Amino acid sequence: MQKCLQITISGDIYDKGFRSSAMYIAYIHNLKGYVMYIRPHDVYIEAEGEERDLNSFVLWCKSDSVSSALLQVSISESELKGFSSFIMVVLMEK
């Protein structure tokens, strides 16, 4: 069954390649959506796909390889958006 998750990860992960790694993990699990920084130490992810693949992705988000710098992982379910790929959103600062 397809689901969409909204994931916010807070912690010291800025400049550690987290977004690139998230894109790779999403790709191998055939997830669609996006990842972006929302504050200097927070990452926001919307990911949709099969429940088992999302569960694997969430486990990765909470894993020891990432979590040494994590403070909190917040997850909520959302309606499906119909994303066609998984991308990294880069916001330009003024």
Image: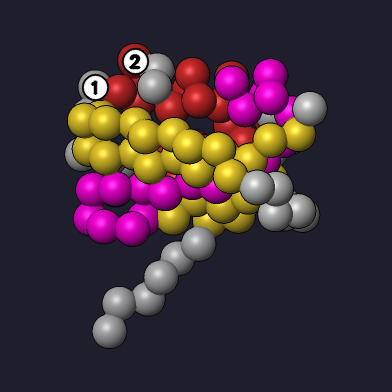
The residue furthest top is 64
x, y percentage for residue 91?
A: 41, 70
Q: Nearer the viewer, residue 81 or 58?
A: 81
x, y percentage for residue 9?
A: 34, 39
Q: Say which element carries label 1.
A: loop
Q: Is residue 7 above or below residue 61?
A: below
Q: CA distance from mark 2 to mark 1?
A: 6 Å
Q: Give the residue type at disc 1.
A: Ser
> Is 92 positioned to the left or the right of 86 in the image?
left
Q: Give the residue type at disc 2.
A: Asp
- Pointer 2 and pointer 1: residues touching (CB < 8 Å)? yes
User: Is residue 5 magenta-colored?
Assistant: no
Magenta: main secondary structure equals: strand
Is residue 34 shown to the viewer in this render? Answer: yes
Residue designated by label 1? 68
Stretch of the chain drawn in magenta:
37-55
Q: Which mark is residue 64?
A: 2
Residue at image coords 59%, 21%: 55
Viewport quadrant of the C terminus: bottom left
Is residue 24 shown to the viewer in this render? Answer: no
Residue at image coords 37%, 34%: 74
